[in-house]
Amino acid sequence: MDLNFTPEEATFRDEVRAFLKAELPGELSDKVLSGHTLSKEDMERWHAILNGRGWLASTWPTEFGGTGWSPVEKHIFEEECCLAGAPRIVPFGLHMLGPVLIRFGSKAQKAHYLPRILDGSDWWCQGYSEPGAGSDLASLRTSAVRDGDHYVINGQKTWTTLGQHANRIFCLVRTSKEGKPQEGISFLLVDLDTPGIEMRPIRLLEGGYEVNEVFFTDVRVPVENLVGEENLGWTIAKFLLTHERTNIAGVGFSVQAFEQLKALATQQRRNGKRLIDNPLFAARLSEVEIDLEAMKITNLRMLADAQKNGRPGPESSMLKIKGTTIRQALNDLARRALGPAAAPFPSEALEGNLAIAPAGHTRNAARYFNNRKLSIFGGSNEIQRNILSKTMLEL
Amino acid sequence: MDLNFTPEEATFRDEVRAFLKAELPGELSDKVLSGHTLSKEDMERWHAILNGRGWLASTWPTEFGGTGWSPVEKHIFEEECCLAGAPRIVPFGLHMLGPVLIRFGSKAQKAHYLPRILDGSDWWCQGYSEPGAGSDLASLRTSAVRDGDHYVINGQKTWTTLGQHANRIFCLVRTSKEGKPQEGISFLLVDLDTPGIEMRPIRLLEGGYEVNEVFFTDVRVPVENLVGEENLGWTIAKFLLTHERTNIAGVGFSVQAFEQLKALATQQRRNGKRLIDNPLFAARLSEVEIDLEAMKITNLRMLADAQKNGRPGPESSMLKIKGTTIRQALNDLARRALGPAAAPFPSEALEGNLAIAPAGHTRNAARYFNNRKLSIFGGSNEIQRNILSKTMLEL
Amino acid sequence: MQFEMSEERRLLADTLNRYLSENYGWETRAATAYDPPYHSPKKWADLAELGIFHALAPEAEGGFGGAGFDVTTVFEALGRALCPEPMLPALMAARLLLAADASIDGLLSGEMRYAVAVGEADAPYGIEGLATEARQEGGTWLLRGRKSVVYGAQAAERILVAAQAGAGLGVFEVKAVDVEVAGYGLIDGGGAGEVLLDDTPATLLIGDADAALQDALDFGALALCAEAVGVLDHMFETTLDYLKTRKQFGRSIGSFQALQHRMVDLKTEIEQARSITILAASRMGTDQQSRSVSMAKNLIGRTVKLTAEEAVQMHGGIAMTWEYPLSHYAKRAVMIDHQLGDTDYHLEQVMAAYRAA
Amino acid sequence: MQFEMSEERRLLADTLNRYLSENYGWETRAATAYDPPYHSPKKWADLAELGIFHALAPEAEGGFGGAGFDVTTVFEALGRALCPEPMLPALMAARLLLAADASIDGLLSGEMRYAVAVGEADAPYGIEGLATEARQEGGTWLLRGRKSVVYGAQAAERILVAAQAGAGLGVFEVKAVDVEVAGYGLIDGGGAGEVLLDDTPATLLIGDADAALQDALDFGALALCAEAVGVLDHMFETTLDYLKTRKQFGRSIGSFQALQHRMVDLKTEIEQARSITILAASRMGTDQQSRSVSMAKNLIGRTVKLTAEEAVQMHGGIAMTWEYPLSHYAKRAVMIDHQLGDTDYHLEQVMAAYRAA
């Protein structure tokens, strides 16, 4: 048992740190750390910087331009990026579609799409959920009917994250109504410029805009855009859902959030005393610090398992549950720590002279509300519990 | 809206207080307040005192010797008894069988048994649960087969509280295997002296002895001991389960436990400081104080509903859940407050000179463990949630 | 003991509920709460006409209420409708004006909107440690300091300000036209403002004002508890409905036992929250007023967070959207804990009594 | 990074687990834990012969272990078997004897049973505020005071006592024959005693002993965390088995979703408890030792209570009985929080670092 990094791992971490120090633009990390929304250009800028360094495709084999990192190296890279306030890599092309094409795509698809993901030519978004099919994905109804050399798509997708920036979408569609619901699903690549597609923003509860509805009306997609076989799309969906999800516990985000929170609690005053010296607040803070310290080890233990077994076990769903719980607890405390100053609606106007909340913390309440999504999206924590109950506990 | 007692209610409370002050023996209240086990004689003594005052049968109509109290008066009486450390009235004859006989019993049964409950001639215990039929009571298997003027009972009951002191037991038995499991059940009165009955003690986890297993081997019971009709015992069982359960929230116990706990926390020292001045402990204490203050009102609100509607609604199951949660939280804190001094196995030897724990608190850990039963017995809190989900929420 | 609402209060609740459901429905609320002036002057006048303000003041002062249960009746209805009108500062101002023996006619008629400015950035809750100072110059009081996140300040004509005045805290009245107020909207709807006092002329209303201020804060916190109860009821009912109608894996999601048990627990906690608010209301005017209100605000703080988070979680994605009313109820619920003392602040007030034990 | 157990420790764990399962099964444990002397001298000698004590001391001192992970390996196995042998005081005594440069041969051979007496009624946790005093008379140290609930004291030949000795705390060795020990059994099995020091002659082992005592307490708390992990695993597995076999309403109770979700949460918390214990073990000997141990003991305290209560609740009545082993695991789990600092005590140690922030 040795929790220390090997010399090689330590060297790699130093390399990552040096890179981030040199290459991560301060404007970007400021925005990230204070919970501001990044523009499309911000995200493309960071994508290009990483691509320039060859550190973009951590989930791809090296032959396609992947980094060739071990799970521990991936973990180090992600944690360091979080701590530095690097923008999150938009995962839809890189970490979702990329591995799918590498595993299931045709030669032509790989040759065409993979380089375009790396160089940023394509921005992919995801067409999975539907208004009536969220946690119960197999009940999806968006249909694709074969018509000559095309599929004709009709239906609606929702919760399409950052679809407003995308030029392409990968979709699960129903190509057959025979058999079990899982059996008639196919995986299609769609150009968002195709006539008949309409993207509508969904405003989130805190006022932000990051997800969309996508409507398809007689959208014609060439058959060569099918990935894998017709009606076998569920295999791909499951691959994506159980595929090694990187940073599922979000430990790096939490570590960074904890440090910010601790600094905030030393700044904030409550009737003459520092908030961090208030025993009730300090108790809350230390409980979450302890939970997080434990989570770091739990995460590393499961990484070690993944490294040994080639892929994570079902236990990784525990990381999702506990990881989101901890992040949400940190968001909760960051909101509480502001007291009444958490209440103003975030706006550029409020962040200048008025300084109601300390710099970098004007969006703490908004972030708390927005991050309630963490336990809902990507398989709600209830679904994770169902999965764990079946697979891990065999109940 | 008026939370104050009416003048009549206030007068009644004063009367109860005066009675308790004059008539409740100090030896008994000392035992109760420190969590000691009462002897059979202790319980009989208090039973007789209450009977002498005519304050025993609070759940019976006056024509049979009941007190004729309103729900609020019952509540006042119970709360004052708890606060004074009066022994709990053994409910099996008085509050369970009594109302059953009054509602379902024959004239002869009423005439014979009711006075014997009041004067203490009979000590009843309960034969409901079986090893395979606890929460799922309808699956009980103890059989009673008609043989001339007798039923012949074979089977096993368990969790029979204070059976070691009883001379009689009322049982649910299976008289038919036809139809739904609920349909073949009958309610029988059994003399524990009948040949073929064996009572075996169950030692509880903390070392105490209050429940028993009862084994029936060819036990012959006269048919006149059937209450109500054959195979319609489930009606009686349901009547008992949904009948107005007095003091279901246990508010009086909790109020008394809270006062004891607060006094303990002012006595206990942690490295030179009073435990009650420790902010983490004080926070725990005040949270439960607040929960309890709310519970008092919730209890009164539901009493008021019961007074208006003649019987409590399904919401009373909420009182059971929250009431036991609060009592268990108080037991938990009383155990914590002792620190290492909670650890010794309770024994008379330890309570004299050694005084490891403050007087009256030597059994705090034992009480904590024993009272885990509160959320299990009498319909586990999970069963209560199932009931509430169906009846109150209609889910 | 008697748990029925009095006839008068039932009437008051009916009147207010009917008005709000007919005139302050979801569309109106959505169009009002997030844009300047963050409330509706027209609806405000309606509420005055209905006599709602009169319910907040005792008969001797021209009202017809003013007791704890009057306050909870009004604010529970406001909470149910998620009404963003600045009624809370009106209530607190009424308490201060009454303590000062000043006229409340303008307040009762709705013609004068008040804000009450106590908290500051470094002393957000309670009256300890306030830094704003008052000094006298040529017979005029001048105030200096900054009051932060003053609810309703963006729309007020008068601001009642707590400030250090020599020996102790005083309450001063400031005209909005005499002071810089930087107004803004709030994340859960409604408005507030920073009150920037820079030798602002003021009238002394109450000297030695600790007790009067604590009383106003108590009444304000009680009102927030009652508002929370209305918000909680709405969230619970909405979630219950959703569980009954929403289908997943071929069955209503309300048929899943894990959710059923959580709903039962939620309902239990909400009933407890209602109970502690009743208790606090019944203790207004007694020597237990402040401690009971703190008990209530603490339990409310715990319950709003639990309920808001559970309601959103059990809904799933839909409750994350601006379009779905529940999300706004959830925001309001959570943000109630940021007004007039949070869960921990009030727990400390409750704990304080042990020190004397 | 490397999460595999070393070959040596795997062997140690296997040896100990095999010995306990073959020689310290449930019947033996039940017959040993609740009657004087509350442990088995025969089994104690066996454990010594197996070399278990050697795993608690470093090679330089004649052992073959002594690191954090050696300690957790041994105590996790003891916890799994709910073994009532006084191994904890042996570990803590070993730390003190090593700090004193005293011989630990008697301890390693199992011939000498030690108890470590630190806590007192008014200072139960940690080393602050201890009242027991040492004074010198004619070259002999005499101790006066009372040490309360000293684990293993009822069976010890030697007691190491923390006492105020002028400038600071010292550690003294007392012979059991020289002192009155009132022994008793514990509610969760095993024994302890009150050590009544009444001018008891003693040998000074360590002067200025704060650091040595804290180290012994840290190792003791780490051992308790590891023991707890063993206890937790057993409770979880037993409950899981029960849920799979016990039928109610015609189906296994493990098919009820509400219980399934609770079991998943329990498993998650138990894995977290295991992780924090690994973390603390890895930090022994570093400047983070005490704070990491406090983190672990706090999280363990939260987890043992949750797991014990949930395991009993999900079992129902059967787990309330003396006959059913789980009930004893549940008692042990809960009572671990009463040894060497409870959940709150250790949270305060963790919080203390913020004061310097």
Image (cartoon, coloured by chain):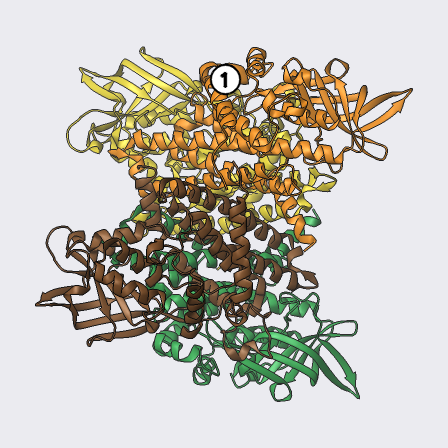
Chain colours: A yellow, B brown, C orange, D green
- Choose between D325 and D203: the one closer to the eye: D325
In the displayed structure, C218 sits above or below B227; it is: above
Give the quarter of the image for residue D18. Answer: bottom left
| Quadrant position of residue A185 | top left
Q: Residue C110 location in percent, x, y?
A: 63, 15
Q: Nearer the viewer, residue C102 or A370?
A: C102
* Mark 1 residue type: Arg
Q: Residue at x 56, y 26 (%)?
A: A36
Residue at image location 28% in from the left, 66% down from the top: B158
- Left or right placement of residue D157 versus residue A61 in this view: right
Q: Residue at label 1?
A: C29
Quadrant containing the C terminus of chain C is bottom right
Among all residues in the image, which is located at the extreme front?
Answer: B63
Q: Position of residue C8 (x, y in %)?
A: 52, 25
Tell which subunit mark 1 falls on: C
Vertical order, B198 against A26 (above or below) = below
Q: Is any part of residue D247 visible from this angle?
A: yes
Look at the numbered disc 1 and give the secondary structure of its residue. helix
Query: Residue, x 68% and y 64% (percent of image)?
Result: B271
Residue farthest toward the left in the current orientation of the protein: B148
Residue B184 placement (x, y as % from top left): 15, 55
The residue positioned 42% from the left and 74% from the top of the image is B41
Counting from the top left corner in percent of width and height, residue A147 is at 18, 15
Q: Is residue A46 visible?
A: no
Q: Is residue D330 left or right of residue B174?
A: right
For residue B259, above or below residue A101: below
Q: Residues within 10 Å of mark 1 (few under 14, many from 20)?
A: many
Q: Quadrant of residue A384?
A: top left
